[in-house]
Amino acid sequence: MTTSLKKTDVVVIGLGATGGVAALPLTQAGIEVVGLEAGTWLQTRDFAPDEIRNNFRAWPHAVQKTHREIPTHRPHASAPSSPRLTIPPMLNAVGGTSLHYWAQSWRLNPWDFRVVTETARRYGVSRIPKGSTVEDWPIALTDLEPDYDAVERELGVSGKAGNIAGTIDARGNVFEGPRAREYPMAPLRWSEWHERMASAARGLGWHPFPGPAAINTTGYDNRPGCLYHGYCNRGGCHVNAKGSTAVTTIPKAQKTGRLTIVTQAHVTSIDTDRSGRVTGVTFVKGRERFVQPASVVLLATYTYENVRMLLLSRSKAFPRGLSNNHGQVGRHYLTHATGGGVTALFPMNLNNWYGLPAQGVAVDNWADDNFDHGGFDFIGGGNLFLYSDRRPIQAAGMATFGRVPSWGSEWKAFVKTNADRWHGAYMQKTTLPYEDNYLDLDPVVKDPLGQPVCRITADFKENERKAAAFCQDKMEQWYRAAGAIEVVRNPLGTMGPSTHAYGGTRMGRNPETNVVNEWGFSHEVANLGILGASVMGTSGARNPTLTAQALAWRTARHLVQQWKAIATS
Amino acid sequence: MSRRGGVSRREVLKRAGVAGTAILALPDLGRVLPGTTDVVAQTRTLTAEAFATLHAVCARLIPTDENGPGATEAHAAEYIDRALSGALAAGRNNYKQGLAAIDRAAQQTFGAGFAKLAPPQQDAVLRALQETPFFTLVRGHTLQGTFCDPIYGGNANFVGWDLIGYPGVRLSVSAAEQNLSTPPAPTHTSAYDSGMFEKIRIDDDQS
């Protein structure tokens, strides 16, 4: 039996980092919103500084929808499936993964929006890697600037501007595109260790700067500043200094009285009528099935679930899945090349036991097109980021640099001395989309409701591997300059389930190669909007969340402005 | 001779696994397991024999030596045994088979169960197995049991955190406490001592 609920203006599927942002401009404009969230509310009491809970047992402990839908992965179409992850990349809760993410809140650089044009202009079109389906974005950084600015204010982002309306400030990122004004708050502090690394970078002629974060560094919006206690990596904040949507945009939207939140709602399909417009969504809560009719549907789960939900929502108008009559749903998938880090050993303690992954020194000299690629055989690059954060189990599991075995008395003596003397760099590298990297439905593996999970078919290509090796060279140079006595390079890893997953519902003007238009609405379904990094066609060399949130703000803003045309046409 | 003795002991242990306290009367087990009475009484998942093997394995991975307490004092094996009835329940069969394989290898090479071998012999057995998935699994769990928050039953008396110099759980850290020159003093508290956080239900912490 299915209960049909009262029709609403907009139903948002997923109240996480992007759905939780979009709800605010909509409700403030007088639009009624129903938010369907698979998880529950979590409170500061749920955010214990506990490594086992956060990092080993898929925090929090409640069994979640996302645990049962972990995508499968194979590197290419004729390869067997890789071993399935046991921990899902994302979290179900009001606020979603923005509760326990690192909160690094970057704007993309101008180049990331114009990879094709800029590469052709500077090096010739032959430098676009073979097989890549990369396109310019339909918008430029300048188009998105007001939306970046809005979400930086609403969430509370701390940082140091490097380019205010064209005036460069070397205390910030000198390579960033122009922004209208300074960050709402000063950046997270640096420790003596950060200063030491920054000084080494300056000695190399590079431009170190503090990374931006949706983390308060002072009281902001009635939330306190960061206490630097650690356990921020896959951990929620015990004082709400982290600007998750659960403590920022969602409560503000609730204050309008126009946001209804349904928790533990498992959406099974987006429903359409004969004309091909969406009419609402079907979801399961407990043992009951409901239909939530709506004038507009905003799909805001996560890259894998966005794609899966569309492919599962088949109808007469969309026999291959919703908004997939051009066969583009699932195409242009990519994950950040965040593997391939570098680990170093120093001859002194670093006192890195506290702090957080967003408290770091960044170098952008080797990212994007910030350096001349004329003499290289790849495009793009990476952001190098060094942060203070060390947990005890992780510390004891340190690399041994070939100096001792991995267990026994020799090993014990080694970790006793060196547990606080190693450091691992976080390096996010350009990844491009390719013809044969894609998402679809797994033919075998299903969730408990019998619906297939998402299947990833993707691997890093030559361009990504070359860019990664180049960044490792640069990182080794930096560590050595700071006095490291050992340096090892880690493997790049796979394109399996990732917290930085992009594409699958790419944004672009051409409906033959893209799922959504420049406003985030489907080319095929006028009243279906899609939010999240699944609309992004390039990765940039930095965390995706703020860009996904700015795009969500932009989509919501467009919906408000074009309400009649979108909701009733 | 020693082989026959091993088999005989195994039979005794097997019976003891069914009838709990009988095992405490075995003199050689007391030697194998320091502070054995509590330990064996609290075994939740593994048979006494399997636990004795696990305990001995953990003790070689992170030995008690001139650098102080190791996995034994941290109660790493107890942590694993407990977790195998909770969050790590899916690994129970791996442990049953993996520990049996270690004992078999010990029997084949040195003619006695792993727990009864001398440390150099135990190390030889482990070195031969150190590329196996089960060794990787046990090593990972031994690290967890030695360096976890003590609420999980491991890192007893903070011996793991003290070994690596982790200054402990704090809820607020000053700029001075993050500096190179002034590492703070250990707090020796669990995350849950403050009363600020919901205690997880450890034994049904399935994921």
Image: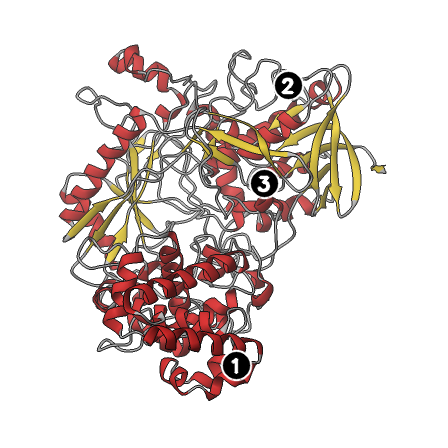
Task: Tell me which label, 2 or 3, sits earlier in the chain.
Answer: 3
Residue type at mark 3: give it: Glu
Measuring from the top left, give residue A65's x and y in whole percent: 62, 45
In which quadrant is the C terminus of chain A drawn? top right
On whether disc 3 and disc 1 are found on a single subunit, the reply is no
* Nearest to the observer: residue A399 or residue A418: A399
Q: Tag 1, which chain?
A: B
Residue type at mark 2: give it: Arg
Residue type at mark 1: give it: Ala
* Residue B185 seen in the current view: no
User: What whole-number distance in Å separates the C-alpha atoms at marks 2 and 1?
Assistant: 60 Å
B173 versus A331 height, above or below: below
* Nearest to the observer: residue A295 or residue A475: A475
Q: Tag 3, which chain?
A: A
Colour scheme of the rendered structure: secondary structure
Measuring from the top left, give residue A197's x and y in whole percent: 21, 50
Q: Which residue is mark 1?
A: B41
